[in-house]
Image (spheres, grey):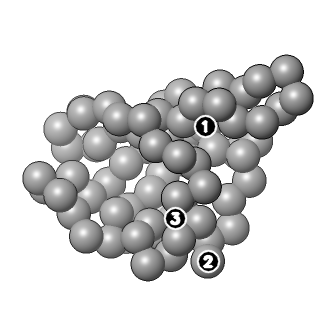
């Protein structure tokens, strides 16, 4: 299980264990919080294709799917 702190998400780098459409390396480009400090939006961008998608930031904790950093 990856250690993920919601306050340190922005600009963090991630590697998807099983690349889809040659998208393997990602950067968190946008994180929005509600008034209570909970994440309400997390967007990642693929380094190679620049595609942007919204994800549930808690999914990054699954080390079978995501690795922290670019591996």
- In the structure shown, which secondary structural element does the residue marked by tag 3 occupy? strand
- In the depicted structure, whether residue 27 falls above or below residue 70: above
Between marks 2 and 3, how big is the CA–CA gap? Answer: 10 Å
Question: Which residue is depicted at the point 63% across and 44% down?
Answer: 9
In the image, farthest residue toward the top: 35
Q: First in sequence: mark 3 or mark 1?
A: 1
- In the structure shown, which secondary structural element does the residue marked by tag 1 occupy? loop
- Would you identify the image quadrant in which residue 51 lies? top left
Residue 25 or 61: which is nearer the viewer?
Answer: 61
2 and 3 marks in contact (CB < 8 Å): no
Q: Residues within 10 Å of mark 2 (few under 14, many from 20)?
A: few
Q: Which mark is residue 40?
A: none
Question: Which residue is depicted at the point 61% across and 71% down?
Answer: 2
Residue underneath mark 3: 68
- Would you identify the image quadrant in which residue 20 lies? bottom left
Expressed as whole percent of the image width and height from the top left, the position of residue 31 reads 60, 30
Expressed as whole percent of the image width and height from the top left, the position of residue 56 reads 53, 46
- In the structure shown, which secondary structural element does the residue marked by tag 2 occupy? loop
Between marks 3 and 1, how big is the CA–CA gap? Answer: 13 Å
Which of discs 1 and 2 lies nearer the camera? The answer is 2
- Would you identify the image quadrant in which residue 49 lies? top left
Q: Which mark is residue 10?
A: 1
Q: Residues within 10 Å of mark 3 (few under 14, many from 20)?
A: some
Expressed as whole percent of the image width and height from the top left, the position of residue 44 reads 42, 39
Between marks 1 and 2, how big is the CA–CA gap? Answer: 19 Å
Residue underneath mark 2: 1
Question: Which residue is depicted at the point 48% across and 52% down?
Answer: 13
């Amino acid at each position: 299980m990856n250690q993920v702190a919601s306050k340190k998400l922005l600009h963090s780098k991630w590697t998807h264990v099983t690349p889809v459409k040659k998208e393997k390396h990602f950067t968190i480009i946008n994180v929005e919080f509600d008034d209570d400090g909970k994440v309400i939006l997390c967007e990642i961008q693929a380094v190679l294709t620049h595609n942007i998608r919204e994800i549930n930031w808690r999914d990054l904790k699954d080390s079978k799917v995501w690795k922290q950093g670019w591996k």
